[in-house]
Amino acid sequence: MSVAEASPAEVVVKARPFSTRFLRSELMLIFGRRRNWAGLAVLAAIPLIIAIVTKIWPPGGGPGGGPGGEGGEGPSFFNDITSNGLFVALTALTAELPLFLPLAVAAIAGDAVAGEANQGTLRYLLAVPVHRTRLLLVKYAGVVIFAFAAALLVAAVGTVAGLALFGGGDVLLLSGTTVGFGEGLLRLLGVCAYIAIGLSALGAIGLFVSTLTEQPIGATIATMILIVVSYILDVIPRLEWLGPYLPTHYSMEYGELLRDPVSLAALRPGLFSAACYTVIFLTAAWARFAGKDVSS
């Protein structure tokens, strides 16, 4: 008996098995491009420069590390580098967070959809077939993975360079408490995770902008303009009421992870803000892309 003659109860529909092939293909696309390798090389060069310059010209003054977070200002670790090389990583993350790290993520997010449309591969990609919702989720997953990879790369290069030039040992926290080197590394990983979550929220904004155009460079520039404007608005005294609603307002609050004890209540607003921006702009990207007429 053929399938056409079979009763509905006798017809068995096989569900498609879960596969990570699409995501793996996206990650190969992201991490396989030379321009992305060049961007990662720039990110990795910053901690090296900081370590070498500090070794040649040691900073003066007492311990750094003032409170950070308000008005877009983060804790300063320059004066602590010579006492423990782990602070090279923290200094590099603080230095790169206002511009270099967001720019790297904006470039990946801006290229996610607009790049496919610009190269004429988006229509063929959807004809595989790949559901548009799944395509957006995979694209965003690639952005998130890149954000974590970028933050960890800066931290790893800074840690290795710092330990090689200044050594390790116990870590003096911002609260004045001293912890072991192992706990210091764990706190550094926590800082990377917090920063990457914030960058992922900016990536969601970039992904939405990427659905509005077929020019990846334009999407990247537009995303960076929004990020820069957010930083500027956050430092204007008359607009203090607007600060908590800006996507970059809590970006420097990772300093709380370097205090003892760590206050989860102080970290919650930043994580909540990142989650809200992620949900809002992923939904906006889905609403835009789901009904978009793809002709290229």
Image (spheres, rainbow, N blue to C red):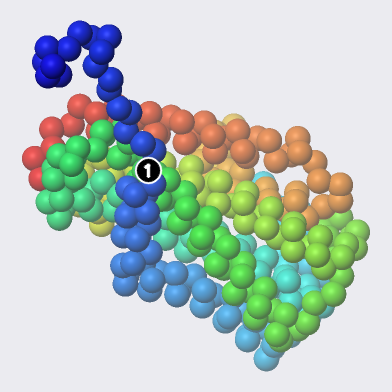
Q: Is residue 8 visible?
A: yes
- The percent coordinates of residue 206 (x first, y second) are 36, 45
How many tags in the picture? 1
Q: Is residue 74 above or below residue 208?
A: below
Q: Residue furthest left?
A: 295
Q: Is residue 38 above or below residue 3?
A: below
Residue in the picture at 62% in, 56% down: 192
The residue lying toward the viewer, choosing from 211 and 156, is 156
Give the structural element (helix, strand or loop) at label 1.
Answer: loop
If the image is split into quadrants, where does the C terminus sit? top left
Q: Is residue 216 left or right of residue 240?
A: left
The residue lying toward the viewer, choosing from 40 and 239, is 40
Q: Is residue 228 visible?
A: no
Residue in the picture at 74% in, 57% down: 187
Residue in the picture at 32% in, 33% down: 16
- The percent coordinates of residue 233 (x first, y second) are 50, 44
Q: Is residue 7 left or right of residue 219?
A: left
Number of residues whose C-alpha sits closer than 10 Å to that of mark 1, classed few (under 14), some (14–19) or many (20 or more): few
- The percent coordinates of residue 34 (x first, y second) are 32, 72
Q: Residue furthest front?
A: 1
Q: Is residue 222 left or right of residue 92?
A: left
Q: Residue furthest bottom?
A: 56
- The percent coordinates of residue 117 (x first, y second) are 17, 48
Q: Is residue 44 above or below residue 245?
A: below
The residue indicated by pointer 1 is 19
Kind of residue sitting beneath label 1: Ser
If the image is split into quadrants, where does the N terminus sit? top left
Residue in the picture at 67% in, 48% down: 253
